[in-house]
Amino acid sequence: MRPSTLTLHLLAAWLTLNALPAFAQTSYPAKPVRLIVPYPPGGGNDTLARIFGQKLTETFGQQIVVENRPGAGTTIGTTFAARAAPDGYTLLLSSIATHAFSPHLYAKPGYDALRDFAPVTLLVIAPTLLVVNPALPANSLKELIALAKRRPGQLEFASAGTGSSAHMLGETFKSLAKIDIVQIPYKGGAPAIVGTISGEAQMMADPAASVLPHVKSGRLRALAIARAARLPDLPQIPTFAEAGMPEYTASAWYSVHAPAKTPGDIVARLNRELVRIVNLPDIKERLKDLGSDGVGNTQEEFGRFVADEHAKYGKLIKAMGVKPE
C-alpha cells in the first residue's frame, strides 16, 4: 500500500523539525559574538574574558568581541546583557558580583539574577588574597588586625567600586576581624590595585587572579589566601586558617550567562565548548599562574551553585547592613 500524500507531508515536517536543533548547533555562530564584561579593562574579570574569548574565537571561527560596560557595581553591563536579544550573540562574563552581591546591594539593579539569565557554566574560582602596601608595618594577618584596632577608622582598603568583589570581600574581612577600616571605591579593579600599590589605600582583599602578579613582582605584600592549601608556586603565603582566621572562606568566581530564553541547543553548545576549554593544558597552566582553579560544570550544577550563592550573600549583606554609596 502506497503512503498517502498527507502521510508524506507529515513525515517531511517531522524530519524538518527534528533536524532544526542539529542545524542550529552547526550553524551557530554565524557572526561575531559579544561578551559583556561589566568592569573596565585591566582587572581579573577582563583578563579571564579575553583568555576564554580568544579560545572560543579559535573554536567557532567567529570573533568573540569583549565589550567592557562598567559602572554602578556591575549593574550597567549586567542589565544590558539581560535585555539583549536571546539569540546567543550576547553573553555575559558573570561573577559573584553580578549574581550574588549587586542584586542585594541595589534596590533596583535592573535585572533579576535568577530569572533573567540562562546559566552556561562556572569557569573559575579565584580565592581571595589579602594584600597590603609593602610600606605598611604589618607582616602578618595578626599584625594587620592589631594595627587596625590601634588605629580605628584610619586604615583604608581599595575596591573596584561599591558592590564589586573587592568591596564585599573587604567588608567580609572587616566584619569577621571586628575592625574599623574604610573603603575607597575606585572605578575598576586596575585603578584600585594601582591605588594600593601607590599607598593611597593600605590594603585590598581581591581575587588572586587580579593581584597575584603584583605580589610576585614585590609591589604588594600578601598576608593570607582563602584556600584550603597554600599555592604551590608561593608557599610562603599562609591560608587564612593558618593565619588565625579559619572562618574567612570567601572566594570570587567567574562564569558565563546568556540572556534568558536563549535557545537550549546554543546554551548547551556553549557549555560543552567552555568546559572543554577549561580543561585544556595551556588554560590550566594560565589559571595556575593566576592562582585560580578552573571548574567547568553542567548547566544544572551551575544553576544550583548560583542560587545558593545568591541566597548566602543576600543574608550576609543584610546582616552587615552594607549599602551602595
Image: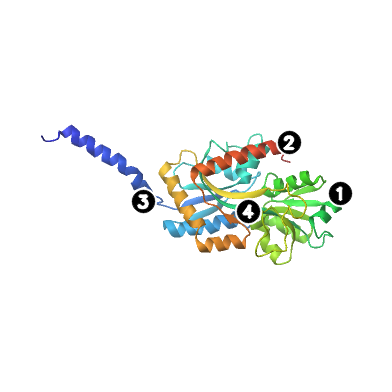
Determine the image quadrant of residue 267: top left
Asked if the residues shown at circle 4 and circle 3 are in contact, with their CB atoms under 8 angstroms apart, the answer is no
Residue at position x 71%, y 35% in the image: 318
Q: Which mark is residue 149?
A: 1
Quadrant in which the C terminus is drawn: top right
- The correct choice, above or below, for 288 with respect to 305 in the image is below
Q: Amino acid at mark 4?
A: Ala
Q: Which residue is mark 2?
A: 319
Q: Are marks 2 and 1 in contact (CB under 8 Å)?
A: no
Q: Is residue 29 left or right of residue 201?
A: left
- Residue extending farthest to the right is 150
The percent coordinates of residue 58 (x first, y second) are 45, 60
Q: Nearer the viewer, mark 2 or mark 3?
A: 2
Density class for disc 3 (Cα within 10 Å; few <14, some 14-19, many ≥20) is few
Q: CA distance from mark 2 to mark 3?
A: 48 Å
Q: Earlier in the sequence, mark 2 or mark 4?
A: 4
Q: Secondary structure at mark 1?
A: helix
Q: Residue 99 — which label?
A: none
Q: CA distance from mark 1 to mark 4?
A: 28 Å
Residue 26 got which mark? Answer: 3
Q: State the residue at coordinates (52%, 43%).
A: 301
Q: Secondary structure at mark 3?
A: helix
Compute the Cα span from label 3 to label 1.
60 Å
Task: Say whether disc 1 or disc 4 marks the residue closer to the N-terminus.
Answer: 4
Q: Quadrant of residue 129?
A: bottom right
